[in-house]
Amino acid sequence: MVLGTYKEAISARATDKAIQNVAQDGGIVTALLSYALEEKIIEGAVVAGPGEEEWKPEPLVAMTPEELISAAGTKYTFSPNVWMLKEAVRQYGLEKVGTVGIPCQLMGIRKMQSYPFGTRFIADKLALIVGIFCMENFPRASLETFVDEKMNSSLESVEKMDIGMGKFIVNTQDDELNIPLKETHGYEQAGCNVCKDYTAELADVSTGSVGSPAGWSTVLTRTDTGASIFKDAVDAGIIETKSMDDVKPGLGLLEKLSTSKKDKSQKEIDKRRDMGLPVPF
Ligand code: SF4
């Protein structure tokens, strides 16, 4: 299946206005982790915190809904959340840990759970893994370069970043600027060219904007754990939902982008293999 194994696909958003105001799309990551925290399903969550420099996220062990809200929003550059899982267990003493990650981070986490040599003390404590859709990611220096040089702006003045309609978009206090994605491809992390997972296929619950209208997110529940926590959050009124059949652009767009990523990466993998270069798959 081009979206990986999932139980249900649904359009959803957080009902809490405080989350809606800071969220990238429907605020599902923040709402779901906050719900899990409040219900003591997890004791803390490793998320991409704001960091000390603008647009340079640093992993944070969030212990309160307020700390989760401080980490809301997509950053488009890497936050080493997997590394922080050890801290969450060893330094914070958490027995039940939640986290959010992009697909490649989730591959590392699931591998650690499957072959927990030396890491069982972390692997057994992961109680909720939320994945976010990811087409590409940029080193922070690359973001700085193309925001400065191609968009005539600066990271310090950027309030929100987004990708949509084939464009990389930044919002400053007074303006919305964009450049075609084909102009940002050269700045991506090298590994993104051979990455075939767009929808975080190894998550308990995956989410991202594609497929749903503005202000909403598409959600794929994948595991029993993920489906159960998501359903309980909906029943508790923390998250509201709409059928994917009733929203536009709908699941077809998500399938199209996921297929395109898999095909494009497979071509690059084949090319590298033909050249005798090492490939990860
Ligand atoms: S495209 Fe793949 S390798 Fe690149 S950041 Fe996203 S999940 Fe990781």
Image (spheres, rainbow, N blue to C red):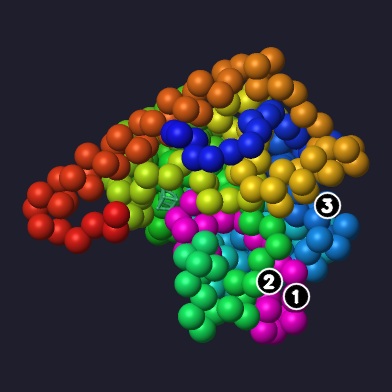
Say which mark, if any, is on residue 35: 3
- Magenta run includes residue 90: yes
Is 172 rendered above or below residue 192? above
Q: Are marks 1 and 2 in contact (CB under 8 Å)?
A: yes
Name which residue type carries label 2. Answer: Lys
Say which mark, if any, is on residue 71: none
Check disc 1 and report the residue beneath it. 95
Q: Residues within 10 Å of mark 1 (few under 14, many from 20)?
A: some
Is 182 rendered above or below residue 116? above
Going by the image, does 155 lie left or right of 49? left
Name which residue type carries label 3. Answer: Tyr
Q: Nearer the viewer, mark 3 or mark 2?
A: 2
Check disc 2 and report the residue beneath it. 125
- Magenta run includes residue 196: no
Where is residue 163? Give x, y as percent.
50, 35
Can you say which quadrant of the picture contains the N terminus?
A: top left
